[in-house]
Structures are given as structure tokens and as C-alpha cells.
Image (cartoon, rainbow, N blue to C red):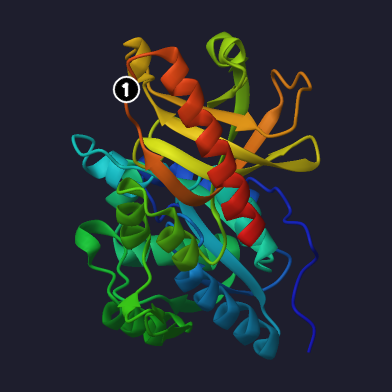
Amino acid sequence: MPRGGGRHATPVIRQRSILFSDSTMSTEQELAYYRPGGPTLLTVGVFDGVHRGHLSLIEHLTKSAQERGLLDGIVTFTPHPQAVLHPEQETLLLTSLDEKVVLLKEAGVHMVVPLTFTRDLSNLSPGQFITLLAQELKMEGLILGPDFSLGKDRAGTTRALEQLGSQMGFSVESVPPYMLEGRVVSSTVIRQAITIGDVETASRLLGRPFSMTGSIVSTSKRGTNLGFPTANLDVDQGRALPRNGVYATIAHVRGHHYPSVTNIGTRPTFGEAKHLVETHLLDFSDDIYGAALRVQFFARIRDEMPFETTGQLIAQIQKDVESARRILKAD
């Protein structure tokens, strides 16, 4: 049976429902913009990183939607809910919104709906939020991940949503957690690995190399003077960065990829304080200022360290380059 709707959502804004207060108008309008052409099977979550656990859930979602003749879709949030509800706590992200949407689409999701997360949205009851999904996204079923909850005070547990489903006529299914190497794969575990510089573990849990994308904001004159020009990457504020140090990486720019060495840190040899992400592309000399750069991390080479002389620093960078070549050739 074919899945409902076309490949593109239809942007429609309609009159605000009298069921909701003015505080929900923005959410309703956002959902209305993505109104699909047919009934849907949805899942809801942040999906930061789009890791192996997310991909397992997505596979279940798309397969179930196909079997039921429904359109599959994901409702996600930006910014991260914790950044709104607990702004005093730092919330580091594995992916930007643009990166997340691309990854979800690449995983085969038909419709991705990014909702602006606000305190007004957080104050919706589970019933109010679910009613919006049913009205605007034609939801006929929910696929939920483990330990799922939504709505004010996290009252929309799986059990509560099952009761709502019985009343409102939509299905609810919960999938078990995805396990790898004896542990549940989660965005939190991946962030912890990245924080200590364990990019190899992070990549295994993600199911792809951990990467960062940004524009090249400058090319380091200091690096050029040392014989190792670097591209400085403009990384979104609040992005999870690997621990300071030197990494073997692959740099993707203008449709090509190059072995590279990436340094994250503050250039302690020169007494600088600004935190930088600098990538030296091996065997490459083109001007790429202003271009978009994606850096994939494969292994940590060493800690960041100060050197007494620039000669010692140059000698170490040469060793780092050879280490990167060996690591990347082995991969």
C-alpha cells in the first residue's frame, strides 16, 4: 500500500483553534506549515547526534509506516529543551539543526518538523500537544523511544500516551533501547566520550566519524610561518568539542576530501587564550578562505602542550603529520 502524501510538505497557515491559548499559537502555526498530504506515523524527540540508537528507532518508524500505508515523520526541537528549561547549565550539542535535519533525511525520514522549543511549548499538557500533532500533522500513530516523556512536568509518559491514544484513536508503540558494547547508546554517553577526547568511541556509537562543520574564518598566519598553514573553523557556540589536543582528521571542502591534522586548543606555546579549532590539510595549498569545511575525527594523537622554542614545536608538528598519515592510511 503506498505511503500517503507527496515528497514535499504543504505550507498552510490556518485560523488558530479555540482549544488553545495565545501562548500556543506559534507552535500551531509552525506545525501547520509542515502539514502533510496524508495521515502520519510520528516519533518525537531531540535526536541530537542522530546516533545508532536514533537510527534503530528511525528504521522501525519507516518500516512500520510503510506497512501501514502512512507517511513517516519526526518532530524535533530547537534549541535543545535543556537550554530553555535550565539555562544555567551548559548544554553542548553534537549536531547543529541543519546537520541534524540532513542526517535524518539521509536516514530515510520522509518529513522532519523542527519546532521552536519555548517555555510556552513546555507548559502544554500532553493532551494539548498531542492534539496539535493530530490536527496539524494528521498523526495516526506514535513510535516512542525508551524512557520517553513529553509535556508539562514530563507527564506524557508512554503509559499516559497509551491512555490518550485509546481515547483519541491513535496507536502508541514503544521500542527498546539500542545496546552496543554492553551499554545503551545515548547522546549523553557520546558527549562524555567527546569531552575526554575519545573520538573513536564516539564514532562507534554514532555509527559514523564524529564531525564538525563550519565556515573557514581565517587562515593562520602563524601556522603558515611555521610551514603548516591551518584553516580556522568557525564552530557554533554551544557545540561539543573534543578535549584540547591534536587529532588525525579528514577535511571535506568544495567537494573533495583531504587527510588532515586538527588542533583544538589555545596555542600555549605562544601564550594565547582564544580557543581555536585549526585544521592543517596535508599536501594542499589552495586558498579556501570563506568556504564551508567539514572535519571528521578519527583518532587522538596527543595532548595539547607548550614548547620552549618554535623549533621544538615544528619538530612535533612534523611528527603529528606522520602520525596522522599512518592512522588515516590504516583506516
Q: Is residue 228 above or below residue 60?
A: above
Q: How many marks?
A: 1
* Image location of residue 124, percent across then percent down: 31, 54
Q: Name the image quarter holding the N terminus.
A: bottom right
Q: Is residue 174 above or below residue 272?
A: below
Q: Name the image quarter holding the C terminus.
A: bottom right
Q: Residue at x 61, y 86 (%)?
A: 64
Looking at the rendered structure, the kind of residue marked 1 is: Pro
Q: Is residue 134 above or below residue 121?
A: below
Q: Quadrant of residue 180?
A: bottom left
Q: Is residue 66 left or right of residue 273?
A: right
Q: Residue at x 60, y 18 (%)?
A: 217
* Image location of residue 149, percent across then percent down: 30, 68
Please tell me which residue lies in front, 245 or 43.
Answer: 245
Classify 10 Å Cα crowding around label 1: few (below 14), some (14-19), many (20 and above): some
Classify mark 1: helix, strand or loop.
loop
Q: Is residue 100 left or right of residue 169?
A: right
Would you name the residue on which mark 1 appears?
306
Please tell me which residue lies in front, 191 or 327.
Answer: 327
Q: Residue at x 23, y 36 (%)?
A: 87
Residue 123 appears in the rendering: yes
* Image location of residue 30, percent across then percent down: 55, 46
Q: Is residue 198 above or below residue 119?
A: below
Please tell me which residue lies in front, 317 or 229.
Answer: 317
Q: Quadrant of residue 243?
A: top left
* Image location of residue 126, percent across then percent down: 32, 65
Residue 235 appears in the rendering: no
Q: Quadrant of residue 286?
A: top right
Q: Is residue 75 left or right of residue 243?
A: right
Q: Residue at x 31, y 58 (%)?
A: 188
